[in-house]
Image (cartoon, rainbow, N blue to C red):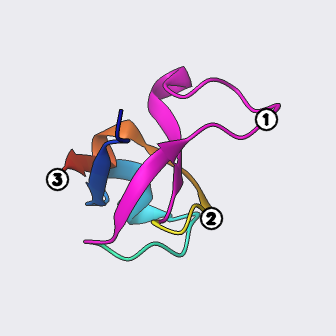
Amino acid sequence: MREQVFEYAPVGFDRWDPRTDLEPGERVRLTQPVGCPQNGTMGHVFVADETGRCRGLVLRKSLRPV
């Protein structure tokens, strides 16, 4: 099964106080780093770029399916 690709479109705190170097429109995939809270906890998910590098934690609502 292929991983779903999302487009980063910052909303809320991701727009007001971004904690990643992601640019709007970048394509990302969900990732689950070892030892971190499960994706979806408090509406946040970990994302990785297309190379697989973890880019950080963002709001789930900031991701649009491609």
* Residue behind mark 3: 66
Task: Tell me the kind of residue under disc 2.
Answer: Arg
Relative placement, left or right, of 44 versus 26 is right
Residue found at the very far front of the displayed protein: 1
**Cα distance in 3D space between marks 2 and 3:** 19 Å
At numbered mark 1, what does the secondary structure look like: helix, strand or loop? Answer: loop
Looking at the picture, how far across and down is residue 57, in whole percent? Answer: 57, 49
Region of the chain picked out in magenta, as a range: 25-49
Residue at the (31%, 60%) spot, across then down: 8
Residue at the (63%, 37%) spot, across then down: 32
At numbered mark 2, what does the secondary structure look like: helix, strand or loop? Answer: loop
**Rendering quarter of residue 1:** top left
Q: In the image shown, does 47 or 50 lie closer to the viewer?
A: 50
Looking at the picture, how far across and down is residue 24, in whole percent? Answer: 29, 72
* Residue behind mark 1: 34
At numbered mark 3, what does the secondary structure look like: helix, strand or loop? Answer: loop
